[in-house]
Every structure is written in structure tokens, then in C-alpha cells.
Amino acid sequence: MILYTLNRIRKYYFILIELFCSFIQKVDLNIKSIKYGKNCKFIGYTTFYKTAHSQITISEKCTFNSTTEWNLLGCNKRCIISTLTPNACIQIGSDCGFSGVTIGAFNCIKIGNQCIIGANVTITDSDWHPIHPNNRHNGDIKTSPVIIGDNVFIGANSIILKGSIIGKNSVIGAGSVVSGNIPENTIAAGNPCKIIRKIE
């Protein structure tokens, strides 16, 4: 009985947190001219950084979790969504879920509909710094778009690097590092991420 009562209290506590955070977050999105669809939810505060003239678009029914309590797998940071150049774009499809995710775009990152992006995943379309040591501080950064298809599940603590394309319905195992093309309807995992088998 005590456990039941505690769980009910926890449930209503999270509902209140979600309502409050979503209200504050949507005010922030409107100030920053970030487009978002209906029924988007924000648990905790998501950091949105939008460079002038860039675009961030979020479709309807997306959920962003930035609290350690909501995701029992272990969300160790808030969601951070950023565009770093004037021409950068981030497009997020409908009914997607994110927990402690970092998305950083210098070029373009597109995420399809109904994607599940696990705790602490990083998605980036750039190396952030040049690879060659002589050029590492000059800001000449290589970029390549990232495309994630519909209904993709990316496991916790994975890293999606520049130029990656993940086909629809595919699953990326936890802790993977993706830097290439993962076909649709595929299970892939590892560092570097390799195809394990097709989803029949």
C-alpha cells in the first residue's frame, strides 16, 4: 500500500514538472524562433542554441527528457540542441523521444518520425575541430549531413558522426559509434558500428 501511494505521488509529481517545464520551454522556443509542433513535452530544461539564420524544426508529439529521475536507465545530462553556423538546420520528425541527447549541427541533421534516441546519445555532422594538427585551431571544419530514417532506435551512449545515414526501422546497439551507412531494417552495433543482422 505504501509503495502504491509513493508511485502515485511520483506520477503526479512528474505530471506537474512536465507541465511547468513545457510551458517555460515553449516560451524559450518562441523567443528563439524555433518551430515546434503540437503536444511536444519537455521534462526538465533542454538547452536550445540557435545561430542567427539557421533553422531548428520540431514536429508534433516529441518528448525531450533532461532529468535523471525520468529515465531510469541513467540520463546524466540535459538535452542540448544546437545549430553552429548560419546555414545549419536540424529537422526532427513527429513522435520522437530524446533523453539527455546532444545534437550539434554545422550543416544539416535530419531525424525521421517515431525515432527513439536513447540516453546520452550524441549526434553531430562535424568533427568540431580540424583533424590535421597544423589546422586544428583555424576553424576550417569539415561537415557532412546526418540522416536518420523513420522508426530508428538508437541505444544509450551511442555517437552518430558526420556523414552517417541510418535507414528506417534500424536499431543501433548501445555504446556504438556510427560513421557510415546503416541500411534499413538492420541491427548494427560496435565501435566502429557494424551490421549484425537484418530485421526480418
Image: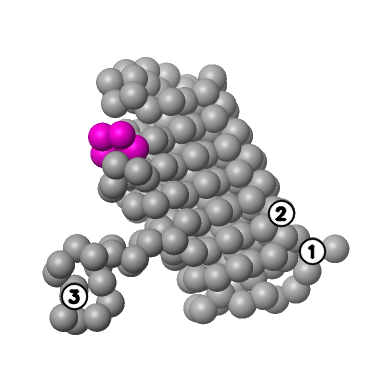
Image quadrant holding the N terminus, namely top right
Query: Crowding at label 3, few (<14), some or many (≥20) Cα neighbours within 10 Å?
Result: few
Relative placement, left or right, of 10 versus 149 is: left
In this picture the colour scheme is: one colour
Instruction: Give the mark nearer the N terminus: 1 vs 3.
Output: 3
User: Residue type at mark 2?
Assistant: Asn
Q: Label 3 belongs to which residue?
A: 135
Q: Quadrant of residue 16?
A: top left
Q: Measure the C-alpha gap from mark 3 to mark 2.
A: 39 Å
Residue 60 seen from this side: yes
Q: Where is residue 125 in the image (x, y as percent from the top left)?
A: 41, 58
| 189 in relation to 8, above or below | below
Q: Where is residue 182 in the image (x, y as percent from the top left)?
A: 64, 67
Q: Position of residue 65 (x, y in %)?
A: 43, 39
Can you tell which of label 1 and label 3 is closer to the viewer? 3
Q: Are marks 2 and 1 in contact (CB under 8 Å)?
A: yes
Image quadrant holding the C terminus, namely bottom right
Residue at (46, 33) in percent of width and height: 57
User: Residue type at mark 1?
Assistant: Ile
* SS class, disc 3: helix
Q: Measure the C-alpha gap from mark 1 to mark 3.
A: 43 Å
Q: Label 1 belongs to which residue?
A: 199
The front one of 69 and 48 is 48
Residue 11 within the magenta-colored segment of the rendering: no
Q: Position of residue 58 (x, y in %)?
A: 49, 32
Label at residue 169 = 2
The front one of 188 and 132 is 132
> Magenta part of the protein: which range?
50-54
